[in-house]
Amino acid sequence: MIVPGSSSQLLAAALAEETGRPLATPTYDRFPDGEGLAAVPDFDGESATVVATTDSDAAWVELLQLQDAVREAGATDVTTVVPYMGYARQDRSFGDGEPVSARAMARAISTGTDRVVLVNPHERDVADFYDMPVETVDAAAVLADPLPADLADPLFLAPDEGAIDIAETVRDAHGTGEVDYFEKRRDRDTGEVEVSPSDAPVADRDVIVVDDIVATGSTMSESVSVVTDRGAAGVVAACVHPMLAANAVTKLRSAGVDRLVGSDTIERGCSVVSVATPLADALESAGPN
Ligand code: R5P
């Protein structure tokens, strides 16, 4: 059975459809003292695929509870799909006394599962923090689906070096276009982002800025401002994980984004594409269920 976390109900339903597996209907309650209680009253079967994006601390706790609940309900094999792995950007200790938060989270959910499937984790190396087999799925190609076929001399732009791979993946899925990237520097204290633009000509071209995640929107909006100022014909901001924290959406609009495209790893208004198909393929090769 596919068992959704509360933040991944649409994706879990799409995955159930895609794989032909039944979809459980968990309950998500909260006690007066604030503690959560996620349960699986209708779970029936020996294998469970828990699908839970971890975009908040509460979502991590809920995932732990769902893993435990399915075992209590009789599952002998558990796959944990984490469409968006929160804390993945804290993949090392950045200062004295700081934790490697991604490792702490990975260890916590390792105990309740037989395997883990991650979608475009910030760095693939976070997979090493888990104590069991991990499959990482690159779902970036789905971001090309909503792009019109007649883009004007398209430029697929990575806002920093780390995003070049996914910009290339989206360009390849679209079928044509150039790939370029900016250099980025973030002030760790203020969070402010500065980009050093490349000199790629953008005037009268359609620019698709591609990143793994839009969190505060600073990286994306800085890059979009540059290409808008340089006369791009149209600007699409595309990301796998549309976290869109705080005022990210208005920052992007002010910078000149014409269209925001995200996937359903985090379910938002801009989640116009689904990672269900690449996930279903990965589940097929990942093991039982
Ligand atoms: C960083 O390397 C990531 O790929 C993203 O560019 C970054 O995390 C986006 O964060 P924000 O939206 O806060 O600038």
Image (cartoon, rainbow, N blue to C red):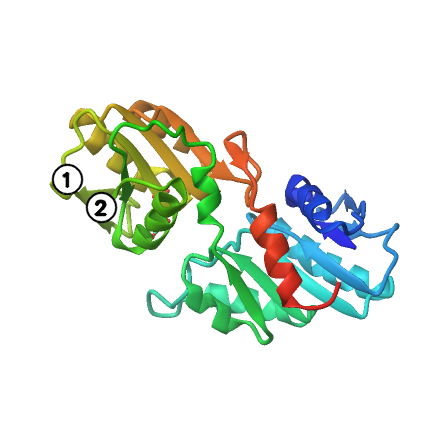
Q: Quadrant of the N terminus?
A: bottom right
Residue 200: assigned label = 1
Check contact, mark 1 vs mark 2: CB within 8 A.
yes
Label 1 SS: loop
Q: In the drawing, does residue 237 fall left or right of residue 198?
A: right
Q: Quadrant of residue 155?
A: top left
Q: In the drawing, does residue 213 fall left or right of residue 41?
A: left
Q: Does the image show residue 23?
A: yes
Q: Is residue 188 above or below residue 149?
A: below
| 106, 230: nearer the viewer | 230
Residue 257: assigned label = none
Give the residue type that dot 2 points to: Asp
Q: Position of residue 268 (x, y in %)?
A: 54, 34
Q: Position of residue 141 (x, y in %)?
A: 45, 46
Farthest-out residue, bottom: 131
| 157, 249: nearer the viewer | 157
Give the residue type that dot 1 points to: Ala
Q: Quadrant of residue 285?
A: bottom right
Q: Does the image show residue 99?
A: no
Q: Callout 2 environment at 10 Å: few (<14), some (14 to 19), or many (20+)?
A: some
Q: Position of residue 18 (x, y in %)?
A: 68, 47
Q: In the drawing, does residue 9 fall left or right of residue 37?
A: left
Q: In the drawing, does residue 97 fall left or right of residue 85?
A: left
Which residue corresponds to the image point at 81% horizontal and 45% vertical from the top-left?
Answer: 25
Residue 180: assigned label = 2
